[in-house]
């Protein structure tokens, strides 16, 4: 039996909401605390692969609009990473080859690694100084694009997680924050 488009929308939203609610609240508060209290004084580097990278780049842009120094690994203007810097990575599997490689290299160069991962107990956990992980094993199996479609549910949740973290950090002064963000918004459009 086929579902209507509104039913499909509800399916996607329900699955995303369910996965978002599996993240440990203490880890979320630690992550948000780092955004508010630590990261504003440090250089932030971002890396992922595929659609997760597109979403991570969106989070980097939000932080840049908020006044953070951000760098996208692989871009021509990305400087070298070193001690005191932070590499923020995302991986649904927690075992994406280039993410593991860059996390390991960043650690060797003295940078901290923060990882947002689509499941618990992955190779990436061993390299990260801070992890946020989703727990799909705690909820029913996804029906999106043949049981998660290469991470579809994770990617939806990742985007909303990052947006919620940004909103949480500025909620009490969001109108002022929005005004400041618009000063850094692209104007060569």
Image (cartoon, rainbow, N blue to C red):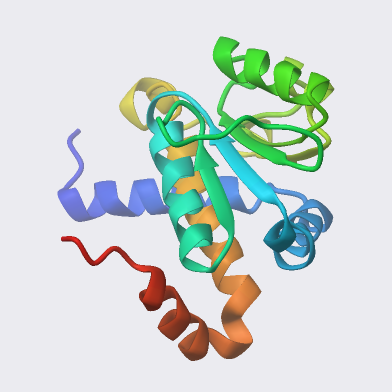
Choose between 99 and 125: the one closer to the eye.
99
Q: Position of residue 19 (x, y in %)?
A: 57, 45
* Above-or-below relation of 165 to 19: below
182 lies left or right of 167: left
| Residue 35 placement: quadrant | bottom right
Task: Name above or below for residue 95 compared with residue 113.
Answer: above
In the picture, which quadrant includes the C terminus?
Answer: bottom left
Looking at the image, can residue 119 be seen? yes
Give x and y (percent) for residue 101. Answer: 65, 13
Q: Residue at x 50, y 35 (%)?
A: 78
Position of 56 compared to 10: left or right?
right
User: Residue at image x 36%, y 32%?
Assistant: 144
* Residue 7 as seen in the image, left or right of residue 69: left
Residue 140 can be seen, yes or no: no
For the residue pair 163 and 22, the one nearer the viewer reads as 163
Image quadrant holding the N terminus, namely: top left
Give above or below for 23 relative to 34.
above
Picture coordinates of residue 133, whole percent (x, y) = 70, 38
Task: Please tell me which residue is depicted at 44% across the width and 54% down the height of the picture.
Answer: 61
Q: Picture quarter containing residue 179?
A: bottom left
Q: Position of residue 29 (x, y in %)?
A: 78, 62
* Residue at horizontal 55 percent and vertical 67 percent from the top: 67
Q: In this rendering, would 43 be left or right of 46?
A: right
Can you tell which quarter of the image residue 139 is in? top right
Q: Count of labels shown?
A: 0
The residue closer to the viewer here, 149 or 73, is 73
Task: Give whichever of 111, 103 is nearer the camera.
Answer: 111
| Vertical side of 10 occupied by 139: above or below | above
């Amino acid at each position: 039996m086929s579902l209507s488009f509104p039913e499909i929308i509800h399916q996607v939203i329900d699955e995303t909401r369910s996965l978002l609610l599996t993240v440990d609240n203490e880890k979320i508060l630690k992550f948000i605390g780092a955004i508010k209290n630590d990261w504003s004084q440090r250089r932030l580097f971002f890396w992922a692969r595929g659609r997760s990278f597109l979403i991570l780049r969106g989070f980097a842009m939000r932080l840049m609009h908020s006044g953070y120094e951000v760098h996208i690994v692989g871009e021509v203007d990305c400087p070298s990473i070193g001690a005191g810097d932070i590499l923020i990575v995302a991986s649904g599997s927690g075992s994406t080859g280039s993410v593991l490689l860059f996390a390991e290299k960043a650690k060797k160069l003295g940078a901290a690694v923060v990882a947002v991962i689509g499941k618990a107990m992955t190779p990436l956990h061993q390299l990260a100084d801070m992890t946020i992980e989703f727990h799909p094993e705690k909820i029913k199996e996804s029906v999106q694009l043949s049981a998660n479609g290469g991470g579809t549910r994770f990617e939806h949740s990742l985007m909303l997680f990052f947006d919620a973290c940004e909103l949480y950090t500025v909620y009490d002064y969001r109108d002022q924050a929005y005004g400041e963000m618009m000063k850094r918004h692209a104007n060569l459009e």
